[in-house]
Image (spheres, rainbow, N blue to C red):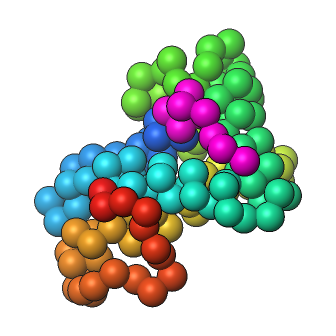
Amino acid sequence: MKMRAFELDWAAKMMDAIIPPGVEDKFPQSASETGAVQILEEMVRYTPFITAFGLRAAIWLIEIFGPAIASGRLRRFSKLDPSSREQVLNNMCQSKIYLIRQLVLLIKMTACFGWGAHPEVRKALGDEGEPKFVQRTSKS
Protein backbone atom coordinates (compact mmCIF):
# COMPACT_ATOMS: atom_id res chain seq x y z
CA MET A 1 0.00 0.00 0.00
CA LYS A 2 1.70 3.18 -1.17
CA MET A 3 1.11 6.48 0.61
CA ARG A 4 0.26 9.57 -1.38
CA ALA A 5 2.36 12.75 -1.30
CA PHE A 6 -0.28 14.74 0.59
CA GLU A 7 -0.47 12.03 3.28
CA LEU A 8 3.31 12.17 3.69
CA ASP A 9 3.11 15.97 3.97
CA TRP A 10 0.42 15.67 6.66
CA ALA A 11 2.53 13.10 8.51
CA ALA A 12 5.59 15.38 8.34
CA LYS A 13 3.64 18.23 9.92
CA MET A 14 2.36 15.95 12.67
CA MET A 15 5.80 14.51 13.36
CA ASP A 16 7.41 17.96 13.37
CA ALA A 17 4.84 19.11 15.93
CA ILE A 18 6.03 16.21 18.12
CA ILE A 19 9.76 16.64 17.43
CA PRO A 20 10.35 20.15 16.08
CA PRO A 21 13.71 21.38 14.81
CA GLY A 22 16.19 22.87 17.25
CA VAL A 23 14.68 21.69 20.50
CA GLU A 24 18.23 21.36 21.83
CA ASP A 25 21.62 22.22 20.39
CA LYS A 26 22.55 18.53 20.37
CA PHE A 27 19.44 17.71 18.31
CA PRO A 28 18.90 20.34 15.62
CA GLN A 29 16.89 18.07 13.32
CA SER A 30 13.12 17.73 13.32
CA ALA A 31 11.48 14.35 12.90
CA SER A 32 10.87 14.88 9.18
CA GLU A 33 14.47 16.02 8.63
CA THR A 34 15.77 12.73 10.02
CA GLY A 35 13.75 10.55 7.67
CA ALA A 36 10.91 9.63 10.03
CA VAL A 37 8.36 10.16 7.27
CA GLN A 38 10.23 7.78 4.97
CA ILE A 39 10.29 5.18 7.74
CA LEU A 40 6.53 5.64 8.17
CA GLU A 41 6.10 5.14 4.43
CA GLU A 42 8.20 1.95 4.56
CA MET A 43 6.21 0.70 7.54
CA VAL A 44 2.94 1.27 5.69
CA ARG A 45 4.31 -0.45 2.59
CA TYR A 46 5.78 -3.53 4.30
CA THR A 47 3.74 -4.22 7.43
CA PRO A 48 0.55 -6.28 7.56
CA PHE A 49 -2.56 -4.59 6.22
CA ILE A 50 -4.12 -3.92 9.63
CA THR A 51 -0.98 -2.10 10.84
CA ALA A 52 -0.73 -0.05 7.66
CA PHE A 53 -4.43 0.76 7.83
CA GLY A 54 -4.09 1.90 11.46
CA LEU A 55 -1.19 4.23 10.69
CA ARG A 56 -2.94 5.78 7.72
CA ALA A 57 -6.22 6.07 9.61
CA ALA A 58 -4.41 7.90 12.42
CA ILE A 59 -2.98 10.39 9.93
CA TRP A 60 -6.34 10.97 8.26
CA LEU A 61 -8.29 11.28 11.51
CA ILE A 62 -5.81 13.72 13.07
CA GLU A 63 -5.69 15.76 9.86
CA ILE A 64 -9.45 16.02 9.40
CA PHE A 65 -10.86 15.83 12.94
CA GLY A 66 -7.93 16.62 15.26
CA PRO A 67 -8.46 20.38 15.55
CA ALA A 68 -12.22 19.96 16.04
CA ILE A 69 -11.75 17.28 18.70
CA ALA A 70 -8.97 19.09 20.55
CA SER A 71 -10.00 22.73 20.36
CA GLY A 72 -13.33 23.04 18.57
CA ARG A 73 -11.66 24.51 15.48
CA LEU A 74 -13.11 23.53 12.13
CA ARG A 75 -9.81 23.54 10.29
CA ARG A 76 -7.50 20.87 9.01
CA PHE A 77 -4.42 20.06 11.08
CA SER A 78 -1.96 20.88 8.29
CA LYS A 79 -3.44 24.39 7.91
CA LEU A 80 -2.70 25.32 11.54
CA ASP A 81 0.45 27.17 12.61
CA PRO A 82 3.14 25.05 14.33
CA SER A 83 2.24 26.08 17.91
CA SER A 84 -1.45 25.31 17.29
CA ARG A 85 -0.50 21.90 15.89
CA GLU A 86 1.46 21.13 19.03
CA GLN A 87 -1.48 22.24 21.19
CA VAL A 88 -3.91 20.06 19.22
CA LEU A 89 -1.72 16.99 19.72
CA ASN A 90 -1.25 17.77 23.41
CA ASN A 91 -5.00 18.11 23.88
CA MET A 92 -5.63 14.89 22.00
CA CYS A 93 -3.08 13.08 24.22
CA GLN A 94 -5.08 14.15 27.25
CA SER A 95 -8.45 13.06 25.88
CA LYS A 96 -10.63 10.85 28.05
CA ILE A 97 -11.29 8.76 24.94
CA TYR A 98 -8.74 5.98 24.54
CA LEU A 99 -8.90 5.86 20.71
CA ILE A 100 -8.10 9.56 20.39
CA ARG A 101 -5.04 9.22 22.63
CA GLN A 102 -3.89 6.20 20.63
CA LEU A 103 -4.10 8.05 17.30
CA VAL A 104 -1.47 10.48 18.50
CA LEU A 105 0.57 7.72 20.11
CA LEU A 106 0.87 5.88 16.77
CA ILE A 107 2.26 8.95 15.05
CA LYS A 108 4.50 9.79 18.02
CA MET A 109 5.88 6.26 18.12
CA THR A 110 6.74 6.35 14.42
CA ALA A 111 8.27 9.84 14.66
CA CYS A 112 10.46 8.81 17.59
CA PHE A 113 11.42 5.56 15.90
CA GLY A 114 12.59 7.38 12.77
CA TRP A 115 14.20 10.28 14.63
CA GLY A 116 16.07 8.01 17.04
CA ALA A 117 17.39 5.86 14.21
CA HIS A 118 19.04 8.79 12.43
CA PRO A 119 22.88 8.60 12.59
CA GLU A 120 23.37 12.20 13.80
CA VAL A 121 20.79 11.80 16.55
CA ARG A 122 22.31 8.48 17.60
CA LYS A 123 25.77 10.09 17.67
CA ALA A 124 24.46 12.96 19.85
CA LEU A 125 23.00 10.32 22.18
CA GLY A 126 26.41 8.61 22.36
CA ASP A 127 25.62 5.63 20.15
CA GLU A 128 27.48 5.14 16.87
CA GLY A 129 26.53 3.18 13.79
CA GLU A 130 23.35 2.20 12.03
CA PRO A 131 20.76 0.42 14.17
CA LYS A 132 20.33 -3.22 13.25
CA PHE A 133 16.54 -3.00 12.97
CA VAL A 134 16.49 -0.26 10.30
CA GLN A 135 17.45 -0.78 6.70
CA ARG A 136 17.09 2.53 4.92
CA THR A 137 16.32 2.53 1.24
CA SER A 138 18.13 5.85 0.88
CA LYS A 139 20.33 8.00 3.09
CA SER A 140 18.60 10.91 4.77
By secondary structure, the bulk of the magenta-drawn segment is best described as helix
Residue 29 colored in magenta in the image: no
Q: Which residues are magenta?
A: 1-10
Q: Nearer the viewer, residue 32 or 17?
A: 32
Residue 136 locus on image (x, y percent): 42, 67
* Relative horizontal placement of residue 127, taking residue 76 as reference (left or right): left
| Quarter residue 129 falls in | bottom left
Q: Is residue 91 above or below residue 69?
A: below
Residue drawn at (51%, 59%), measured in percent from left and top? 39
Residue 117 locus on image (x, y percent): 39, 72
Residue drawn at (36%, 60%), measured in percent from left and top? 138
* Relative horizontal placement of residue 99, taking residue 62 as reference (left or right): right
Specify the farthest residue to the top. Answer: 74
Residue drawn at (75%, 54%), measured in percent from left and top? 52
Residue drawn at (20%, 75%), measured in percent from left and top? 124
Residue 3 colored in magenta in the image: yes
